[in-house]
Image (spheres, rainbow, N blue to C red):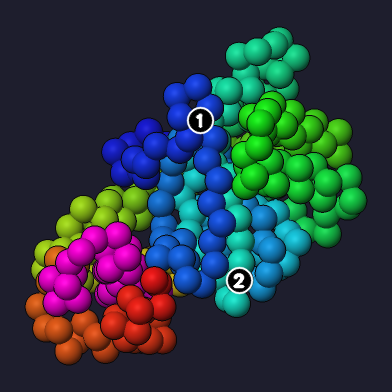
Amino acid sequence: MKYIKYREDKKHGTFDFPIEFYHVTASHPRYEMSYHWHIEYEIIRILKGEFLMTLNESTFTAQEGDLIFVQSGALHGGIPKHCVYECIVFNLGILLSPNHIGETFLKKIENSSIQIYHHISNCDEELKEIIKFLFEAMRGKSEGYKLTVIGALYQFFGYVFSHHYYKPVGNVSAKNNRRIEQLKKVLEMIETSYDQCLTLDMLAKEAGMNAKYFCRFFHEMTHRTPIDYLNYYRIEQACLKLVTSSDSITEVAFSCGFNDISYFIKTFKKYKGITPKKYLSASF
């Protein structure tokens, strides 16, 4: 299931060091984490506030100091609240190749025979220090930081195994697999066609459901209505275009699926709390 078409195609890190670091505050154009998945693994730490995370069909709130671990292929997204958070996205393969000891333990994660706890709260001092070294090395990128990062990742997984922060993976029901795959198809449609006229019936058809059942299904999975999520995604893309292109506000609105500039401004303010013009001014 995790290798179906819809996934984040962004390259994380470089070929010889496939690890990437992100520091996210309220001013970040992608402050809210839209639903997506990738073949890499991800560690998220909450520095401030709280983060409502949905991971496959599980939803939980992470608080300041908590960690979130995202398995390869997991569909995930979240809503931050007065939150500052950081992410490290990495390819597990960089830890598998150097030695047999790494493979012995990490293969259990790669082949999904075990599942690391998604939400780690009340971290003790040992784990805090490991995570601090990991994230500070990625942020600072001083000479030799790659060695520090690789070492800290080994320490993290060593801690996970020694403290048994994982569980065996049972058989996931065919029904759950089907629900996640149906949602991924709809999210792919939104991601690739958000600039076009998308209706509720079109999204429901993509999921193979009638509109009424689809609305209930989508809300159960994402905690948003389908049209609310579509508009939210359009505004997220608009924010990114406003700060990364020279397009005017009107051009950005039309390129994100809005055919009425007044409605675009109203919708933008609903999700961001300010107008596009003020958002643009605050970003520079």
Which residue corresponds to the image point at 86% horizontal and 33% vertical from the top-left? 162
Q: Where is residue 180 in the image (x, y as percent from the top left)?
A: 41, 50
Earlier in the chain: of badge 1 and badge 2, it is 1
Q: Do the residues labelled 1 and 2 touch (CB within 8 Å)?
A: no
Q: What stretch is highlighted in magenta?
A: 224-253
Residue 150, can we see it? no
Which residue corresponds to the image point at 65% horizontal and 13% vertical from the top-left? 98
Which residue corresponds to the image point at 54% horizontal and 35% vertical from the top-left? 19
Q: Name the residue under label 1.
A: 18
Label 2 element class: strand
Kind of residue sitting beneath label 2: Cys
Kind of residue sitting beneath label 1: Pro
In the image, residue 117 lies in the stretch drawn in magenta: no
Left or right of residue 237: residue 48? right
Q: Residues within 10 Å of mark 1 (few under 14, many from 20)?
A: some
In the image, residue 239 lies in the stretch drawn in magenta: yes
Left or right of residue 7: residue 191? left
What is the distance, in whole Å, between disc 1 and disc 2 at their CAs? Answer: 26 Å
Residue 101 placement: quadrant: top right
| Quarter of the figure that contains the C terminus | bottom left
Q: Name the residue under label 2.
A: 83
Q: Which one is nearer the viewer's eye here, 10 or 73?
A: 10
Residue 96 versus residue 163 in the image, above or below: above
